């Protein structure tokens, strides 16, 4: 599955957009470059757009991904945009994130995610 990654300078966050089949391996591959981009800019905000993902991510992988985020991105604020048809997956991710101490919130609206990510810190 391809992913697109870029720095959004006006909001001081990194955007990563996944498309097609989302797998744990693809997630792990994308995190290396994502972490490098966050470090390069010294930012602590990440927007993950999953609206182009065609499969449902298995529950065990959601848990793994959030636990991985806790270790790799301990001080990063993370907004995740799910397609509206996967809103329940977002709620599950939110619950796992709270229980694991990860600063993550899910959305089905892209603009709401950007607002939460950028306005929360007054930028």
Image (tube, rainbow, N blue to C red):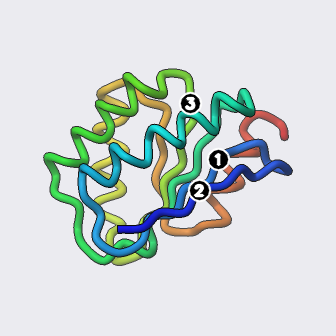
Camera-side residue: 11 or 28?
A: 28
Label 1 vs label 2: CA separation? 7 Å
Q: Which residue is mark 1?
A: 14
Q: Which secondary structure, mark 2? A: strand
Label 1 Cα crowd, 10 Å radius (few <14 / some 14-19 / many 20+):
many
SS assignment at label 1 = strand
Question: Disc number at residue 76?
Answer: 3
Residue at the image position 85 percent from the left and 51 percent from the top: 10
Residue at 49 percent across and 61 percent down: it is: 81
78 in relation to 15, above or below: above
Pointer 1 and pointer 3: residues touching (CB < 8 Å)?
no
Q: Is residue 17 above or below residue 46?
A: below
**Nearer the camera: disc 1 or disc 2:** 2
Q: CA distance from mark 1 to mark 3?
A: 11 Å
Label 3 environment density (alpha carbons within 10 Å; few <14, some 14–19, many ≥20) = some
Give the numbered dot on residue 5: 2
Which of label 2 and label 3 is nearer to you? 2
Whether residues under marks 1 and 2 lie with C-beta atoms below 8 angstroms apart, the answer is yes
Q: Position of residue 67 (x, y in %)?
A: 29, 31
Q: Earlier along the polypeptide chain: callout 1 or callout 3?
A: 1
- The quadrant of the picture occupied by the C terminus is top right
Residue 58: quarter of image: bottom left
Percent position (x, y) of residue 44? 65, 31
């Amino acid at each position: 599955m391809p992913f697109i990654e870029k720095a959004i300078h006006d909001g001081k966050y990194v955007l990563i957009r996944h498309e097609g089949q989302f797998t744990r391996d693809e997630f792990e591959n994308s995190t290396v470059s994502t972490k490098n981009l966050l470090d390069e800019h010294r930012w602590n905000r990440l927007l993950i757009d999953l609206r182009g993902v065609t499969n449902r991510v298995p529950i065990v992988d959601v848990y793994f991904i959030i636990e991985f985020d806790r270790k790799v991105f301990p001080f990063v604020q993370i907004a995740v945009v799910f397609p509206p048809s996967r809103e329940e997956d977002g709620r599950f991710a939110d619950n796992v994130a709270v229980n694991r101490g990860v600063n993550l919130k899910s959305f089905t609206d892209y603009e709401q995610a950007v607002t939460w990510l950028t306005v929360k810190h007054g930028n």
